[in-house]
Image: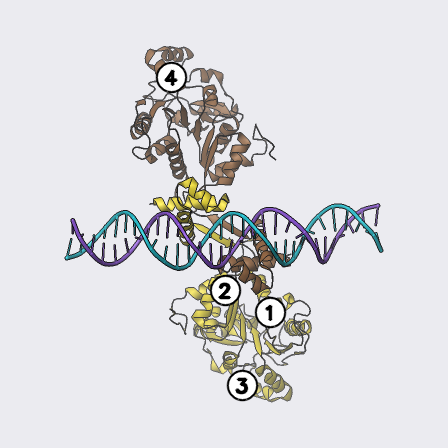
Chain colours: A yellow, B brown, C cyan, D purple
Amino acid sequence: MTTTVELLSVRAAELYYEENKTQDEIGVLLGLTRWKVGRLLTQARELGIVRIEIVHPRARKHSMERELCERFSLVDAVVVPSAADGSSVADRVAEAAADYLRALRPPPATLGVSWGRTLDSIAEHLPDGWARGVDVVQINGGVSLNRRAGTAASTAVVIARTGGGQATLLPSPAILEHRKTRLAIEADRTVAGVLERAAGASAYLYSAGVADASSVLVDSGYLSPEDVAELVSRGAVGDVVGRYIDADGNIVDNELDGRTVGISLTQLRSAALAIAVISGGPKQAIARAVVSSSLCSVFITDEATAKAVLDNPDSGTTLQERS
Amino acid sequence: MTTTVELLSVRAAELYYEENKTQDEIGVLLGLTRWKVGRLLTQARELGIVRIEIVHPRARKHSMERELCERFSLVDAVVVPSAADGSSVADRVAEAAADYLRALRPPPATLGVSWGRTLDSIAEHLPDGWARGVDVVQINGGVSLNRRAGTAASTAVVIARTGGGQATLLPSPAILEHRKTRLAIEADRTVAGVLERAAGASAYLYSAGVADASSVLVDSGYLSPEDVAELVSRGAVGDVVGRYIDADGNIVDNELDGRTVGISLTQLRSAALAIAVISGGPKQAIARAVVSSSLCSVFITDEATAKAVLDNPDSGTTLQERS
DNA sequence: GGGAACTCTGCTCACATGAGCAGTTGGCGC
DNA sequence: GCGCCAACTGCTCATGTGAGCAGAGTTCCC
């Protein structure tokens, strides 16, 4: 049932927010004191009778960001609202990531980046001169074998060029056939040098992939659909810098991981600033895994994904009581 | 493209409405003066970036009400928002009508009412003792032949009883087979007396019916589906107190009208207070006809119907220029 | 290049508003 | 009936806020 006070609240809210009357005028009109009216309005806002919404593609969901930060001990989080209009969510998340990078103070001296569609889109959204002297280094392999090799390289190059620095590419496949080959290539002076630079980066920026046959790692011939199916059956939810993890953030297949070139998850976890940019329906599981296993310190995503991450009741490894 | 000011507006709006910061604080944060922030916020509201909504079944759409009043020279209008939750719109409109009646000052000495599902619902929503001494009189025929005769009578009786007055029923069919019979029955002392009371009512409350085979007039056997189809082919959009009108509010069939018992549309048009309560998708055409042909001075409806009435570009017989 | 028309900016000032507080009312147990 | 607690009411006062105004900056036309 709708109570009398509720009805009064509605009436007052209408007069206040739609008719632009003062609380005083409303008081006279409804036969109440202006303080009573003020209290009714506060109540109306608290009860959700009055809903104030910010409708803009570039708006953000601060309450969710705050909750993400608290629940997962993040340094920062950015949540972009789900599209009211038709604009692509992935695009707006990339834009937000670009904004975030741009606003970093101080800007990272060296930025470690992965590659993929998301990283590409971020690069596109970085305006010329977004920073001065930001060197970029690739943190996982993928050049040459990959259909997207050109893009992978260009992503890093574009970010570096617009950021006024140099790009260092990682001249290695993402996954090798034998562990020994990986050790050998990593021992090579060129590759070793790049990996060292990568390890010393002041910030990391990466996305994550879904564990299914549509993965770029399958697409590029590093893995067969059967390999991925096997990984999934063993609990894999997706990959981060080429390494497949389960819902708890653990490496699913140590043998495979031993053949994968790039910085380790441990390095990522201990980094001062690791920015994960993950959005879109299919990526919710991997997003949850990344965030809840502390693979990132900054999480940039869309509203739906954030909701999925937050709604998971048993997530939040570092859930803290707050007063 | 999203301009810089727009972005600033969004940012300011977020801080103001979501973080509850003062304009002063926002000014410091964004490096602006507090006046600039104030202006950005005003702009954000004007541009619709900030949307303030009142979400409540009993809320009303004042801007539409105002527009209806202006466009159609109404004394008053009530527009109930389309259901956010699942509750019946028809029910909420009836509730609004009941509220309206109750709030009438002074209450009508005699209230002329039609009958039907809508009127019934209104009666149900009137609380006991909603007025003191309101006599009720039926304004159109329908007793006895009608399946709903009992309801028709009870509607009037309930309104009268709860309003602390007497009900006067119109003991006549809605439509007779011959004009002569109608004249004869109207000449009968009882019926004549009731019609006289009806003509002298201080306010009228009625709904309207759709012109199709589902009409209560067909249902009750007054008209055959073929009759209605014929009326529709001649432009009928619905009926008001048993009389079929076209989109311009004119009687469609004078012969039929001559056989219909009850107050005339002319009487309705010249009434000081004629309250039409019309809602629901199929009734949009008849609602438009009623409002645009001045059959009512008060119009109570739902948001969708109001929108349909207002969107019709060539409606508004008395459209006035306002400064 | 000069000037008029315009917008934009920061300000004063009056008004609107919420926090905090004391007095009042209305339950509720004894 | 009596007193206690809790909720509610109306108030003071400090603060937040928008209207209106004058000066600065910009655009545009001759």
Please tell me whether mark 4 or mark 3 is closer to you in this view. 4
* Chain of the residue on which disc 1 is drawn: A
What x and y, as percent, mark residue A123?
63, 69
Depth order, front residue of A215/A304: A304
The x, y position of residue B309, in whole percent, is 52, 34
Q: Residues within 10 Å of mark 2 (few under 14, many from 20)?
A: some
Q: Residues within 10 Å of mark 3 (few under 14, many from 20)?
A: some
Are dots 2 and 4 on a single chain?
A: no
Both labels 3 and 2 in a single chain = yes
Which quadrant of the figure has residue A174? Answer: bottom right
Separation (CA) of disc 3 from disc 2: 31 Å
Q: Secondary structure at mark 3?
A: helix
Q: Quadrant of the N terminus of chain A?
A: top left
Q: Chain of mark 3?
A: A
Label 4: which residue? B195
On the rendered structure, is B80 left or right of D9? right
Q: Name the residue that disc number 2 marks.
A: A282
Q: Which residue matches tag 1?
A: A103
In the image, is residue C12 above or below residue B182? below
Task: Check residue A179 in the rendering and tell me which mark sits there, or answer none.
Answer: 3
Residue at image coords 50%, 54% = A53
A261 over B175 or under it: above or below: below
